[in-house]
Image: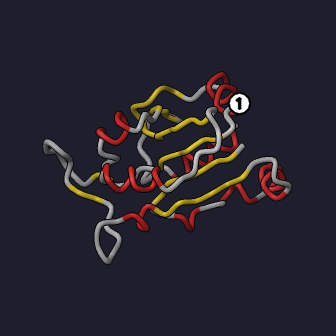
Amino acid sequence: MRVIILTSYPEMFPGSLGHSVIGNALKSKKFNLEIINLHDFGIDKRGSIDDEPFGGGPGMVIRPDVIEKAINSISIKSKMASRVFLTPSGIKLSQNKLQELSECEEMIILCGRFEGVDQRAIEILDFQEISIGDYVLAGGEIAAQVLVEGC
């Protein structure tokens, strides 16, 4: 399986995925982990990726154009590719869902930050919304590690 992580904190990977049984699977190429830094697709010299939510609301969200550019930079090699956005409001992750995702040849995981991701990007780019639990983390990187290890 090819796993592509879209994140604003690439230094968090491989994290726990680089150790123990999962680390051995990564080293022996049972799965491939590619990390894409969203800041590489930012809008200014600083690589800014956030903006106020379209239509108003609190905080900042990751811009849809940044996500689209990052997605367009990926060469998808399989029709069996899945796009996942990790969010507390998504469908609850289950063993059945992990089994389904593990059968994909490629998986793109979008890690949110700030107040999340502009919902237009989720809908237009056809991401599944999945939750690892009914709570909020600072970002999606830990959740992405849970999802990958589970697969």
Comparing 77 with 34, the one in front is 77
Residue 112 x, y percent position in the rendering: 41, 50
Q: Circle 1 is placed at which residue position?
A: 103
> Horizontally, is 149 left or right of 67 in the view?
right
Q: Residue furthest top?
A: 96
How many marks can you see? 1
Q: Residue furthest left?
A: 56
Which quadrant, please, contains the N terminus?
Answer: top right
State the residue at coordinates (35%, 36%): 124
Q: Amino acid at mark 1?
A: Glu
Q: Is residue 72 above or below residue 39?
A: above
Q: Quadrant of residue 127?
A: top left
> Horizontally, is 39 left or right of 35 in the view?
left
State the residue at coordinates (41%, 43%): 136
Q: Residue furthest bottom?
A: 45
Q: Quadrant of residue 20?
A: bottom right
Looking at the rendered structure, the secondary structure element under dot 1 is loop
Q: Residues within 10 Å of mark 1 (few under 14, many from 20)?
A: some
Residue 106 x, y percent position in the rendering: 64, 41
State the residue at coordinates (47%, 40%): 86
Comparing 45 with 94, the one in front is 45
Q: Is residue 6 above or below residue 147?
A: below
Residue 3 x, y percent position in the rendering: 64, 48
